[in-house]
Image (spheres, helix red, strand yellow):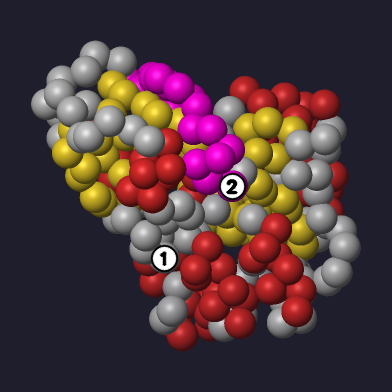
Amino acid sequence: MHVSRRWLLAAAPVMALAATAAAADTTDLAVSCDLAAVPAVAGAARAFRARSGIRVRIFPTPGGLLIPQLLRDIQNDIVVTRPALLDRAEQAGLVAPGGRTALWRNRLVVAEPARPTGAANTFAVPDPTPAADFDGAEVLRRMGSPPVQIVGVIDTEAVAWMLRHGGARQGLLHQTEVTADARLRTVAPVPDSAWPPILYTATITRLASRPDPGAFTAFLGSADGMAAFRSAGLERVT
């Protein structure tokens, strides 16, 4: 399993050329993945490699960049993202209709450091940017939270950094991010009334050129794949 921040250069045409040229030279699978889903997909990738010997290379990708990547032919065998984005990708002919895996939920949670150090009543949240999948200040408003000093940052990765380094006492994160970091802990889940559930599914893209990408999507529905997702903090939606 390999995780890359390819999305930082996703708009560069040279990336598309390089990815296309290398597409068929390996059995490694390229998976573009919502940022907060990375810990779960990485765990599944490790289990899949142990069973099959095939490496899964994971490219964390903000939702706003997923479709532009596919339009620019940046190599993606599989995408793991929200159903609404895959609906748009289907409409654009970037993925085939059907063939999606089961739905998995990533809960939003109020989190804090395992050893709180930030100033009391400081709360870090992601601003409504393309790098975030929820509006942190709006979530707090809907929760009716008591007055706090809100620290707005670009995404939940920055929220986690603020919590770890004393920039805020609490913050909004995805459960997967808290589960993956022993320095953080969950205080309480965010109620559904404060923000719609964040769901993921996976499918194969029209750019898939490596052998049998369906083996990995099928693995996600196996007992080992589901166990990897659950241990990372995702909940199966039935």
Q: Residue at x 17, y 38 (%)?
A: 149
Q: Which residue is mark 1?
A: 130
The amino acid on which the numbered mark 2 sits, given as a three-letter code, is Pro
The amino acid marked with disc number 1 is Pro
Query: Observer-nearest residue: 194 or 222?
Result: 194
What's the distance in space between the residues labelled 2 and 1, CA to CA? 17 Å
* Percent x, y of residue 51: 77, 32
* Residue 44 at x, y percent in the picture: 67, 36
> Which residue is tagged 2?
196
Q: Which residues are magenta?
A: 177-196
Q: Residue 5 at x, y = what percent? A: 42, 57
Q: Residue furthest right?
A: 98
User: Is 106 in front, or is 221?
Assistant: 106
SS under mark 1: loop
Taking the image as shown, residue 111 lies to the left or right of residue 232, namely: left
Q: Which mark is residue 163?
A: none
